[in-house]
Image (cartoon, helix red, strand yellow):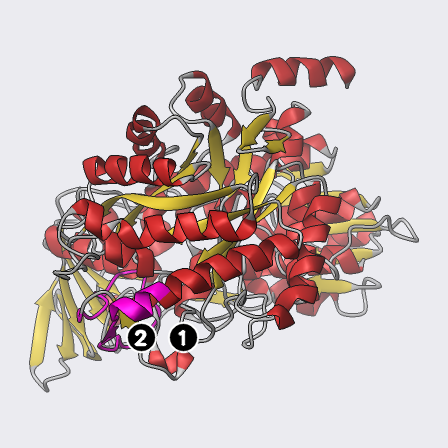
């Protein structure tokens, strides 16, 4: 291990080099991005759940953790239901415990002070939002499902009071034991609204030219530096580009960064913020590595203080960015949600053991759209760090896992780590299950590393894998396992449509697996995620595709704005979409439907693709009754779901054995 550690340290020499922000020394160049977790209370207090979440990431080897979006004006300034509050000393005990837990874990502890401005919603705060100008917060594909409210336009005296509140909050965070504070001037929130020409229409000293628009931020930095005293690190996070509006551009951000440096800021954290779907930009599920690191480079050229780059950074890319001098630190957000031990594994030369983020946006969907606590589709431990403890089993058992999809591989992985003797049976010729199909449609590239990770873990742990072998009742009786875990998945559902058997009807599995080919005219029954992905897949082949959906909109269950991206792409590619339909039957080569307007249509097609979900495959369960001591179900055979449900059920069963 010593040699491997030395080689890894050379490989990531810059990444694990100590750094400094102001007078704060940081053990490496990896920063945990400020992200809201919703583990706090609706009253703004820190919880034990939040503390455990951050402490686990501190112990994972990150150099600096920035706790996200803590409101300096509570509740008026919070953007989400469970933002932490830093505007009163009553919050100090919890904040102090959080800061100490992070430091006990070996990381530096920072916190981001925040005001949502016009992005605050009265449905959450029960108060009118505030802003530099009377402009409704624009709709974004990333919005929570709340209507925007016309904001109150701040007076000069109210602006100066907010400056004082920011400064007091920074000083309070210092007293709580944090090592530094980041001022949130990003992501469409209050300070960003002052900075952006799209949202600041003022004609006084806080509006007009860039220097006036930056005045609010600069006054906050100076007041905060004065309140916290000399030597306490304070920096800001800036939007380098707003797209979807005529707002902040890189040249504007460069000038603001210079002004912030002159005012005493000790570093600049960088970001980009979109207000609309762009067909020129990839959806989040297809974001390339380091997509936002490009925006750190112009800031690095403009200032002499440290610059933090962000945007799907992995260890290799982080090392490259640092070696090329494009930034001084790299921030990792969702990657540290997926695997809190990412830095530790990289430093030990175990990059293949890092759980890869699939950029599925499940985390953001729960926080932003549902107002719930943070979840992760590939890391079931998120938010359960205290309960989900991986301990050696008291009694070693022979465990047979039937099915090699994500649920099967995860339960096998956890069971093996706990010391059980595990055999994994997969009737196909490769592990991966439905994930092997999930990577076929466009823009699903970031799913493939997760399949590779699970396969590698199964191999590394020495789990016996029987490929091409169906686990029959007789086989399992001969193997004599103590526990059988069924991860047999599900089979595509077939809707009851009169005459459907007279048309060429295939399933989404047939299409994505390449088992069948379709003609030029294709009708897809089902406008959920799978149906839409198959439609885009076929449209890219030049097929004339029609989606039929009984609901009023397609792609409704796709996470965190991904549905908006999908609908825009389908429209751009000429896919016909009919919603609110009723199926009346089939005749000849046509599918007969009734539209939501009551019109009867006959749609001629060469092929009908069924994409209306799956039904659990539990045939083996009934056969195993009274034949083995214990049978458990995970994944789709326990109930139709997606990766989060598969991974969650598998992880819990693995821990319970």
Confirm or deny contact between disc 1 and disc 2 (CB under 8 A).
yes
Q: Which residues are magenta?
A: 134-160
Tell whether position 153 is magenta: yes
Give the CA separation, mark 1 to mark 2: 7 Å
Residue 349 visible? The answer is yes
Residue 554: percent from left, percent from top: 25, 67
Q: Nearer the viewer, residue 168 or 516?
A: 168
Q: Earlier in the sequence, mark 1 or mark 2?
A: 1
Crowd tier of the residue under label 1, counting other residues whose Cα lies within 10 Å: few below 14, some 14–19, many 20 or above? many
Residue 108, by quadrant, is: top right
| Position above or below: 610 against 533 | below
Residue 67: percent from left, percent from top: 55, 53
Residue 34 visible? The answer is no
Disc 2 is placed on an element classified as loop
| Position above or below: 252 against 392 | above
In this rendering, would 99 be left or right of 303? Answer: right
Residue 410: percent from left, percent from top: 64, 48
Residue 347, by quadrant, is: top right
> Residue at left 32%, top 61%?
190
Res 631 label: none
Res 129 label: 2
């Amino acid at each position: 291990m010593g040699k491997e550690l030395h080689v890894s340290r050379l490989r990531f020499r810059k990444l694990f080099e100590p750094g400094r922000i102001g007078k704060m020394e940081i053990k490496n160049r990896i920063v945990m991005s400020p992200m809201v977790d919703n583990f706090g209370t609706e009253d703004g207090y820190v919880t034990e759940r939040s503390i455990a979440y951050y402490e686990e990431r501190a112990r994972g080897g990150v150099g600096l953790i920035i706790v996200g979006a803590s409101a300096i004006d509570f509740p008026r300034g919070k953007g989400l239901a469970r933002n932490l509050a830093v505007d009163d000393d009553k919050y100090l005990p919890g904040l102090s415990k959080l800061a100490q837990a992070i430091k006990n874990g070996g990381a530096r502890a920072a916190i981001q002070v925040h005001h949502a401005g016009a992005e605050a919603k009265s449905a959450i705060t029960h108060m009118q939002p505030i802003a530099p100008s009377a402009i409704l917060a624009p709709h974004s594909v990333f919005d929570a499902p709340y209507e925007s409210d016309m904001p109150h336009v701040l007076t000069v005296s109210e602006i100066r009071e907010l400056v004082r509140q920011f400064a007091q909050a920074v000083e309070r965070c210092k007293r709580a034991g944090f090592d530094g504070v980041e001022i949130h001037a990003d992501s469409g929130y209050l300070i960003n609204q002052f900075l952006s020409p799209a949202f600041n229409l003022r004609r006084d000293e806080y509006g007009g030219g860039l220097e006036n628009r930056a005045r609010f931020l600069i006054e906050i930095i100076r007041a905060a530096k004065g309140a916290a005293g000399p030597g306490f690190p304070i920096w800001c996070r800036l939007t380098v580009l707003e797209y979807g509006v005529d707002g902040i551009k890189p040249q504007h951000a460069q000038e603001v960064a210079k002004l912030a440096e002159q005012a005493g800021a000790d570093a600049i954290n960088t970001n980009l913020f979109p207000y609309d779907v762009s067909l020129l930009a990839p959806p989040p599920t297809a974001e390339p590595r380091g997509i936002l690191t490009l925006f750190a480079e112009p800031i690095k050229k403009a200032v002499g203080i440290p610059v933090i780059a962000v945007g799907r950074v992995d260890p290799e890319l982080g090392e490259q960015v640092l070696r090329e001098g494009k930034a001084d630190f790299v921030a990792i957000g969702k990657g540290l949600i997926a695997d809190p031990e990412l830095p530790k594994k990289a430093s030990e030369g175990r990059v293949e053991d890092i759980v890869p983020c699939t950029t599925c946006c499940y985390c953001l969907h729960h926080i932003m759209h549902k107002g719930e606590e943070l979840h992760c589709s590939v890391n079931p431990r998120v938010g359960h760090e205290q309960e989900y403890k991986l301990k050696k089993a008291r009694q070693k058992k022979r465990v047979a896992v039937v099915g090699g999809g994500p649920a099967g591989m995860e339960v096998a992985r956890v069971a093996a780590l706990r010391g059980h003797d595990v055999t994994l049976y997969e009737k196909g010729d490769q592990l991966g299950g439905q994930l092997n199909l999930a990577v076929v449609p466009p823009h699903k590239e970031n799913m493939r590393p997760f399949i590779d990770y699970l396969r590698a873990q199964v191999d590394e742990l020495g789990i016996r894998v029987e490929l091409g072998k169906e686990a029959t009742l007789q086989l399992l009786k001969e193997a004599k396992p103590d526990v059988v875990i069924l991860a047999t998945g599900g089979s595509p559902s077939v809707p009851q449509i009169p005459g459907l058997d007279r048309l060429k009807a295939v399933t989404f599995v047939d299409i994505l697996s390449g088992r069948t080919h379709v003609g030029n005219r294709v009708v897809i029954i089902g406008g959920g995620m799978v149906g839409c992905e198959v439609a885009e897949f076929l449209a890219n082949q030049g097929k004339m595709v029609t989606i039929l959906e009984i609901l009023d909109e397609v792609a409704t269950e796709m996470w965190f704005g991904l549905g908006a991206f999908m609908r825009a792409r389908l429209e751009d590619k000429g896919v016909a979409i009919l919603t609110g339909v009723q199926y009346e039957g089939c005749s000849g080569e046509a599918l007969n439907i009734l539209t939501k307007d009551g019109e009867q249509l006959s749609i001629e097609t060469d092929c009908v693709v069924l994409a209306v979900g799956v039904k659990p495959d539990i045939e083996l369960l009934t056969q195993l009754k009274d034949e083995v001591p214990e049978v458990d179900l995970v994944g789709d055979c326990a109930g139709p779901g997606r990766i989060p449900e598969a991974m969650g059920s598998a992880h819990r069963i693995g821990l319970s054995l």
